[in-house]
């Protein structure tokens, strides 16, 4: 029974720690916009946007926006 309680507490501590790290990354990104937004795990190309065959609409939009900004 003690092992179960210790394991439960350890899992909760690890999950809480991960949430804390994510919050720190978001705060850092907000204070330093020159580095871009904080990259969340599971987001972006190749993870959940259903990119196929190396073509990604998100990546194309970002590169087009970057080239537009460089033209100014």
Image: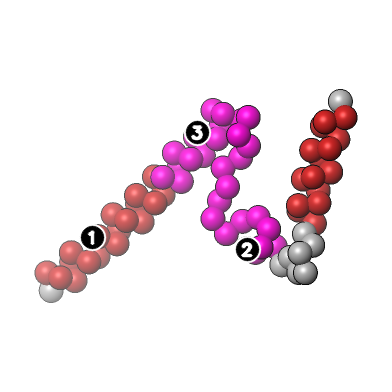
Closer to the chain start, of discs 2 and 1, is 1
Q: CA distance from mark 2 to mark 1?
A: 30 Å
At horizontal 56% and vertical 42% (from top left) the residue drawn is 38
SS at mark 2? loop
Of the numbered discs 3 and 1, the one sitting upstream in the chain is 1
Between 53 and 8, the one nearer to me in the picture = 53
**Which residue does the numbered mark 2 point to in the structure image?**
47
Q: Which image quadrant for residue 30?
A: top right
Mark 1 falls on what kind of element?
helix
Which residue position holds label 3?
Answer: 28
Task: Indicate the position of residue 29 as horizontal and vertical percent values.
Answer: 55, 35
Per the image, the residue denoted by label 1 is 9
Give the class, few, some or many, for how many residues have Cα within 10 Å of label 1's Cα (few <14, many ≥20): few
Query: CA separation, marks 3 and 1?
Result: 28 Å
Residue 28 as seen in the image, left or right of residue 11: right
The label number, if any, that marks residue 38 in the structure image: none
Quadrant showing the N terminus = bottom left
Residue 13, compared with residue 69, is above or below; it is below
Q: Residue at x 79, y 62 (%)?
A: 55
Count all numbered tags in the image, as a single digit.
3
Q: Which residue does the image show at 28% across and 54% down from the upper left?
A: 13
Query: Percent position (x, y) of residue 17?
Result: 34, 49
Q: Is residue 11 above or below residue 63?
A: below
Please state if 34 lies on the left or on the right of 69 as rendered.
left
Crowding at mark 3 (Cα within 10 Å: few <14, some 14-19, many 20+):
some
Residues drawn in magenta: 21-49
| Residue furthest bottom as drawn | 1
- Picture quarter with the C terminus: top right
Q: Position of residue 4 (x, y in %)?
A: 19, 71
Whether the magenta-drawn stretch holds residue 30 is answered as yes
């Amino acid at each position: 029974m003690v092992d179960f309680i210790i394991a439960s507490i350890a899992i909760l501590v690890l999950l809480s720690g991960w949430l804390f790290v994510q919050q720190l990354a978001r705060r850092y990104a907000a204070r330093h916009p020159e580095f871009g937004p904080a990259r969340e795990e599971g987001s972006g190309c190749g993870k959940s946007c259903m990119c196929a065959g190396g073509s990604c609409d998100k990546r194309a939009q970002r590169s087009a926006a970057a080239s537009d900004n460089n033209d100014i």
